[in-house]
Every structure is written in C-alpha cells, then in structure tokens.
Image (cartoon, helix red, strand yellow):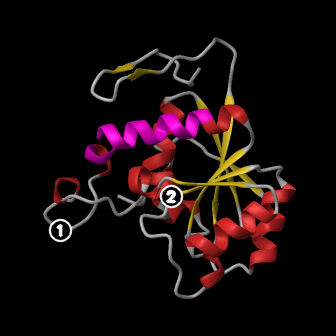
Amino acid sequence: MLPHIDGKSYPEAGFRITLERGTVTTIYTIGHSRHDLNHFLHLLGQHGIRTVADLRSRPYSKWAPHFQRNPLSGALDFEGIEYVFLGSELGGRPEGREFYDHRGRVDYARRAEAPDFVRGIEVLSNLAGRQPTAVMCAEEDPDRCHRRLLVTPALRRHGLEVIHVRGDGSLERDEDPESPAQRALF
C-alpha cells in the first residue's frame, strides 16, 4: 500500500494511494554536494539508508565525478545500497516547455500535477515503505533544492514524514512549507 491520507485517486496515472490510519513512513533527503564518496557513504550508513533515489535530471557532476550515475550506482551496489534513478520523473529540470514559466523557471505547481511526477511519488512511497530510503540531489542545503521545493510537499501530502540529512550528519525534520524560511524563497 502507498501512503496518502485522503485516498486520493489519480485516474490519469492509473492508481490510487491510501494510508492505513496510524502508519507514518519516513523518507530522507540528501545532497551529495562536493563530499568525497567515503563521507557520502558514511552519511547513508549513519542513518541506515538502504535505497538512494537519484532525483537529478542529469546525473552528472563536473566537480565530483564519483557522483556521476555509473560510478555512484556501482559504489552504492558494492555497499549493498540500492540505486534507483528517478530524475526523469522527479528531477528539477523536467523535459517539456509546458513546465516552465515565461522567465524559464520551473513551474513547480504545474509539474507536481503531471502524471509522470505523480508516478514518481508512487515509486518513492513504495521504496520508503520497503526500507529506509533517501532521495538525492546535488545541493547540500535542502532550502535551495527542488527536493524540498517540489518533491517534499508532494511526499508530505501523501502522508510521509521527510527528514533531511545534512552534510555534517545531522538530521533536520522538514517543517511546514509555509514557514518563514520557505516563504522567503518566493
């Protein structure tokens, strides 16, 4: 079963999400930043994360080549951590001009309604329900990343608790997206 408090239907995507009362699933977010690979793997291990869902639209890093898709997925596999690429569904730079405003900025409200985005949230919900899962992007600070601005609100609407793993290993529980820190971004 997938988490969602209201049992909302998404007929265009062909599924329905429901949540058993009293069930809360946690999902983590993490930014790889310019960490060395050992530090990144330590952060995952420190919090018992067993699946990493890569949300980068283009899983490439000029500054940290060990975070390119193939080297990263190989390193995670070696550590027994599942790698799942969801950048096409949940990435911050979606394909298609319909998801951008006249200034070329992503319209997150429009993107969050797209059937492929909704399916991506379903996949994340399933992953998080199976084992500790983190969504990953490049930006260390979740306040400056689409994983908080686009993906986290959708996860929260579906009844998931979201916790951000910071570069120093500390955990930051996601708060109300209407908090002063969030409003300052718009």
Q: Position of residue 6 (x, y in %)?
A: 46, 15
Is residue 169 in view from this perspective? no
Identify the residue under disc 1: 103
Three-letter amino acid code at the position of disc 2:
Leu
Tell me where residue 76 sits by quadrant: bottom right
Residue at 78% across / 59% down in the picture? 44
Label 2–label 1 contact, CB within 8 A = no
The residues colored magenta run 110-126
Q: Which residue appears at 57% of the width and 76% of the height?
A: 68
Q: Nearer the viewer, residue 64 or 77?
A: 77
Considering only vertical position in the picture, is 180 above or below 142?
above
Q: Is residue 135 above or below residue 144?
A: above
Q: State the image coordinates of residue 97 (x, y, percent, origin top left).
A: 17, 60
Which of the 4 image quadrants contains residue 81? bottom right
- Element marked by disc 2: loop
Which image quarter holds the C terminus? Answer: bottom left
The mark that comes first in sequence, 2 or 1, is 2
Query: Which residue is under mark 2?
Result: 55
Q: Position of residue 114 (x, y in %)?
A: 29, 41
Quadrant of the image for the N terminus?
A: top right
- Most extreme residue toward the top is 21
Q: Is residue 111 visible?
A: yes
